[in-house]
């Protein structure tokens, strides 16, 4: 990426909104390097004028960040358990109503989880774990039956393995026994044959099992899997329904297990967990991780992988929640998570609001203009993505916005990308005011 002076950010945003995006470079997810300063001793932050960031204040910000991370993952865990209860009710009595309730529980479970993604890039314990929980896009033919028009990722030997239909699958030269569908078995099948498109677990595997393929292309409509795919006996459709039921149950249990593990990593007052090690580091390291996570989700992941790739290819296969048409909410809550970290705020699943010492409270002391600029840019990004949400609520979803020839819809996505690029420059500027001059947020090899 060619790095431009921060003063050019607004002009760059306008250029993107007018001209669109550059070359496509598709990856499953952006993988961020660990920030170099995260493991080195830090001195109190000093801006260009010589003003220092109070170390005690910085430590309080990192401690509140850890509280927020724990709260967000706790909400993700509790909503995943609610999803599990809804899925159990669906499996006990498969019909349109119980399927609808399970789908609604899945959408609700996404809200806290998506606000956790900003924590991922600065914390390798999350980035190393995330693939089992939220990897996308996936070759759904690995999991279950697909339409005759389906074609998987180029060169993926497992694209049509169909675990549900087969007790043994062959990928290249390897034969794999999948007679028993357990959480452990499914976890072992991720990236089968070396292909990142082989995703057997996580939110998106559950999404596919609840909605099925979205065969509408860039037209209106989401997946429409019938509840009868989970019936046993008279009226059953889909075939191998006992295995489909076992798969849905196992993959949901694995999701709950994984989230429970991450809650433990961030629990307070545990001497040897990840949170304890973060809080023991110099506060400046924690601030860097927070800002690096904000910038990397904003730039490489959300602007790049999740919007730029799908827009350039006019491809609904590259949208995040492609089976459910929930992508507008995914983008909104990803952006909300970035704003949460800067402001030190989080609205919990029960409606209560967490507030505390924030990056904003540090930056405003050093440079009120920089703080005001970043808060304004974060609000503008949220407003730009809110347009996507409003359009989806009126029936025009993200896959329709990115359709070839939909100039107005394409422009909505371009505007959101431009806002994310602009706010990333403001994040870097804020980092500089806290003495972090080489933040270098990950761009996932995209050019903006």
Image: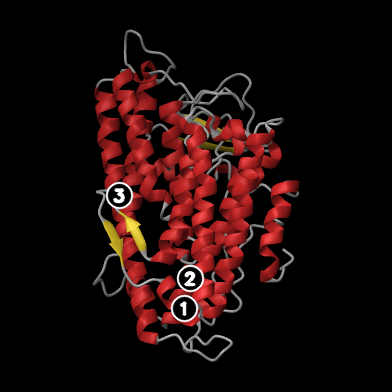
> What residue occupies the far top of the structure in this picture?
234
Tell me: residue 250, above or below residue 46. Answer: above
- In-front residue for pair 277/63: 63
Q: Residue at x 38, y 26 (%)?
A: 243
The percent position of residue 125, horizontal first and vertical second, equals 43, 64
Dot 2 corresponds to which residue?
Answer: 289
Q: Quadrant of the N terminus?
A: bottom right
- Disc 2 or 3, which lies upstream in sequence? 3
Residue 24 seen in render: no
- Disc 1 or 3, which lies upstream in sequence? 3
Secondary structure under the numbered disc 2 in the rendered image: helix
- Marks 2 and 1 sit apart, C-alpha to C-alpha, by 6 Å
- In-front residue for pair 88/302: 302
Dot 1 corresponds to which residue?
Answer: 285
Colouring method of the image: secondary structure
Dot 3 corresponds to which residue?
Answer: 77
């Amino acid at each position: 990426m060619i790095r431009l002076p921060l003063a050019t950010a607004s002009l760059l945003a306008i250029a993107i909104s007018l001209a669109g995006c550059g070359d496509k470079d598709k990856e499953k997810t952006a993988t961020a390097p660990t920030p170099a300063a995260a493991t080195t001793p830090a001195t109190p932050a000093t801006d260009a004028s010589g003003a220092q960031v109070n170390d005690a204040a910085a430590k309080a910000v990192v401690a509140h960040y850890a509280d927020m991370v724990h709260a967000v993952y706790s909400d993700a865990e509790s909503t995943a358990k609610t999803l599990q209860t809804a899925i159990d009710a669906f499996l006990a009595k498969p019909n349109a109503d119980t399927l609808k309730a399970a789908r609604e529980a899945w959408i609700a479970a996404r809200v806290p989880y998506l606000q956790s993604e900003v924590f991922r890039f600065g914390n390798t314990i999350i980035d190393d774990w995330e693939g089992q929980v939220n990897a996308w896009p996936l070759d759904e033919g690995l999991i279950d039956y697909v339409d005759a028009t389906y074609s998987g990722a180029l060169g993926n030997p497992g694209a049509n393995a169909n675990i549900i239909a087969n007790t043994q699958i062959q990928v290249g030269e390897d034969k794999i026994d999948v007679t028993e569908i357990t959480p452990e078995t499914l976890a072992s099948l991720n990236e089968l044959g070396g292909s990142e498109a082989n995703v057997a677990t996580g939110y998106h595997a559950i999404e596919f099992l609840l909605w099925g393929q979205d065969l509408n292309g860039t037209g209106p409509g989401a997946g429409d899997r019938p509840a009868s795919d989970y019936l046993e006996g008279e009226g059953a459709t889909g075939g191998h329904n006992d295995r489909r039921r076992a798969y849905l149950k196992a993959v949901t249990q694995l999701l709950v297990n994984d989230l429970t593990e991450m809650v433990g990593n961030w629990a307070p007052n545990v001497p040897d967990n990840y949170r304890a090690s973060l809080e023991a580091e110099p506060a400046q390291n924690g601030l860097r991780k927070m800002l690096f996570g904000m910038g990397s989700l904003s730039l490489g992941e959300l602007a790049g992988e999740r919007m730029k790739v799908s827009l350039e290819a006019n491809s609904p296969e590259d949208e995040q929640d492609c089976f459910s048409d929930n992508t507008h909410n995914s983008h909104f809550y990803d952006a909300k998570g970035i704003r949460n970290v800067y402001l030190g705020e989080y609205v919990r699943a029960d409606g209560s609001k967490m507030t505390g010492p924030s990056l904003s409270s540090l930056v405003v002391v050093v440079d009120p203009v920089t703080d005001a600029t970043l808060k304004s840019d974060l609000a503008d990004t949220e407003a730009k993505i809110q347009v996507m949400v409003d359009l989806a609520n009126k029936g025009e979803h993200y896959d329709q916005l990115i359709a070839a020839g939909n100039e107005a819809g394409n422009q909505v996505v371009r505007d959101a990308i431009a806002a994310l690029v602009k706010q990333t420059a403001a994040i870097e500027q804020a980092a500089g005011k806290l003495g972090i001059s080489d933040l270098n947020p990950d761009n996932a090899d995209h050019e903006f």
